[in-house]
Amino acid sequence: MASQPDQAAGTGGQPQELPAPAGDRVPDLEYRLRPGDQPLPAPNDGPSLHDLAIEDIRRCVAASAEKGSAIALMLERKRIGYERYGSYLQSGNGRDAKRDLREELADAAVYALQVIEEDNPPEGIDDVYEDILNLLCRVAGMEDGEAS
């Protein structure tokens, strides 16, 4: 798969080239699988899900500054994922995406609560925390096909 250009916030909309995924990657030893872990994502010819999400962010109704920050964060997460796993996040990568979603939302909930519990939480974080909890409750049943 060829390298994919990205539009980085703060670069005047110029593409930011990232390396093509490595076919025979070897993750760092600190990312070894533990009992119960899912397999590492297997690269394929599909598009980067980060790129698809960035296009969705561009279409959303958030203010321009929020979009730029979200896109910059998405590009950073794409870069980190490539460095750790040697491939971009793609569908059909051999992992259980519903499990990943449930686990990441559970983590997001406790991170949001941590922000609330620490000094000087930003305005609106209580609503964000509640939104995350609602999403978590909605996807918690996806394992059994009972998501609402």
Image (spheres, rainbow, N blue to C red):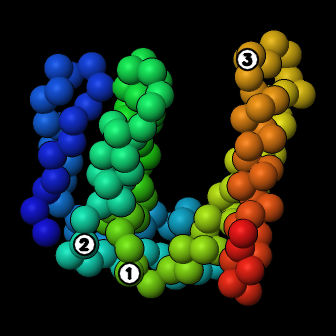
Q: What residue is drawn where x is 35% and y is 39%? A: 59
Comes first in the chain, label 1 or label 3: 1
Q: Is residue 78 above or below residue 88?
A: above
Which quadrant of the figure contains the N terminus? bottom left
Q: Residue at x 17, y 60 (%)?
A: 20
Considering depth in this image, is 3 or 135 the residue closer to the camera? 135
The amino acid beneath tag 1 is Gly
The image shows residue 118 at horizontal and vertical percentages of 86, 23
Q: CA distance from mark 1 to mark 2?
A: 8 Å
User: In this orientation, does residue 54 appear?
Assistant: no
Establish if 136 lies above or below 29. Answer: above
| Camera-nearest residue between 63 and 121 | 63
- Helix, strand or loop for disc 2: loop
Q: Amino acid at mark 3?
A: Pro
Task: Say if 86 sits above or below 37 in the image.
Answer: above
Residue 47 spot, x, y in % from top left: 25, 65
Q: Which residue is mark 2?
A: 46
Question: Between disc 1 and disc 2, whose residue precedes?
Answer: 2
Relative placement, left or right, of 66 versus 91 is right
Name the disc covering residue 122, or none: 3
Q: Are marks 1 and 2 in contact (CB under 8 Å)?
A: yes
Q: Which residue is mark 1?
A: 92
Q: Where residue 6 sits: x, y (%)?
A: 21, 42
Q: What kind of residue is marked 2?
A: Gly
In the image, taking residue 128 as reference, residue 114 lies left or right, namely right
Residue drawn at (89%, 28%) of the image = 117
